[in-house]
Amino acid sequence: MIAIIAMFMDHFATTFYPNYEKYWWLLLIHLIGRVAAPIMWFMVVEGYTHTHSLKKYLERLLIFSIIAHFAYNFCFGISLIPLKDSLLNQTSIIWPLFLSVIGLWVEYQEWKDAKKIGCILILCLLAFPSDWSCFPILCTNHIYKNQGNLKKQVLGMALYISMYVMVYCLCIDVVYGLLQFGIVLVYPIMSLYDGTRGKSTFMKCFFLVLCGTFSFVWIDSCNDVEGKMKILIFGMCNIGKSTVGEFLVRKIGYNFIDMDAKIKEKYGTMLVFQDEYNDQYECDELRAEMISSWIKENENVVIALSPIAYLDAYEDFFEDSDIICFDLTNRTENVFKRLEFTDDNDNLLHILNRI
């Protein structure tokens, strides 16, 4: 129950605040969420120790890892095809838990140490692209070898996770990297565990309700994906925003709005608009208001934006899960070929041939 609640809080927070924001209450939620993984590692060792059928235990973990893969990747916007976009965080923690049980079985075999180490390394390699990477395998192995000594188990996990923290701090975020040491909070929780199986049926009911609710939300969201999406195309002048936007709407059938065309339609020329709103930040704020009104009026829309100077006027769009933002780029020579010069009335001047 504690692991499920902690994991739900952590994933819920990550879904709505995916950019490593530093709000104190958000960091507290993620800190609480750190206890979920080590509880799972402890319980996997307990499951392996007490199971009557290792084959069925592995089958259940494998099946659940496949189901969890789709749920996890959908929740965090990760491609369902493993390793398509990255080598890291490509599936849920259930996959390395499945591999961890195999690792415990390897440890139990009367093999030479070199063979065991080789098998563990292969399992770590297979687990590397998943949530928590290969550390569930290393930590469950350590927990198994030190059953009955909780202090040594938690200390060993902390030492293993220090490598994870180091990589996290160097490659992702220092504060969130240090939060990973929150796994030590599992110590007072696991100290209450007496090794006996609980008798309450509430957990089974709670788990089924939670899975059923998530499945309903998942299916409902999948059905709505095509019907409620806004696409914003950012980029410098002459990069091809309008061209790409028009091509895109022909493919997906969305409405298309060219911001430059809308401004000219209202103010006559871009120069009049710039003269009326001389301050660049004020111009960007006005453009942001225009986008907000267009988004409210259109469920399916592609908007090609005018070049902007101040990103903070557009922060709300970046954080909205229904809005996809593209920053269009191109090679310098291609942009130069697209350059257009106009007079004060926006009439095109054909001067490039004379340069």
Image (tube, grey):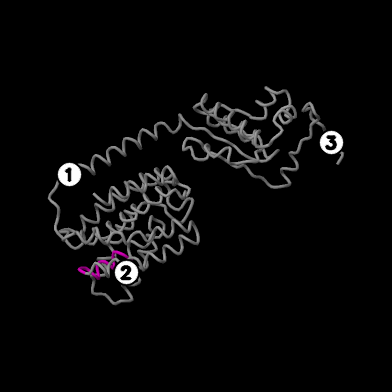
Mark 3 lies on a secondary structure that is loop
Badge 3 amino acid: Ile
* Residue shown at 39% from the left, 35% from the top: 222
Please state if 34 lies on the left or on the right of 144 as rendered.
right
**Local crowd size for mark 2, using a 10 Å CA cut-off: few (<14), some (14–19), many (≥20):** some
* Residue shown at 86% from the left, 41% from the top: 355
Magenta span includes 140: yes
Residue extending farthest right:
354
- Given residues 290 and 121, the one toward you in this image is 290
For marks 3 and 1, give the one nearer the viewer.
1
Badge 2 amino acid: Gly
Q: Which residue is mark 1?
A: 202
Q: Which residue is mark 3?
A: 351
Q: Is residue 322 visible?
A: yes
Please state if 298 lies on the left or on the right of 213 as rendered.
right
Q: CA distance from mark 1 to mark 2?
A: 33 Å
Image location (x, y in percent) of residue 332:
72, 47
Please state if 35 lies on the left or on the right of 323 as rendered.
left
Image location (x, y in percent) of residue 30:
38, 51
Q: Is residue 250 visible?
A: no
Whether the residues at callouts 3 and 1 have beta carbons within 8 Å, the answer is no
Q: Quadrant of residue 164?
A: bottom left
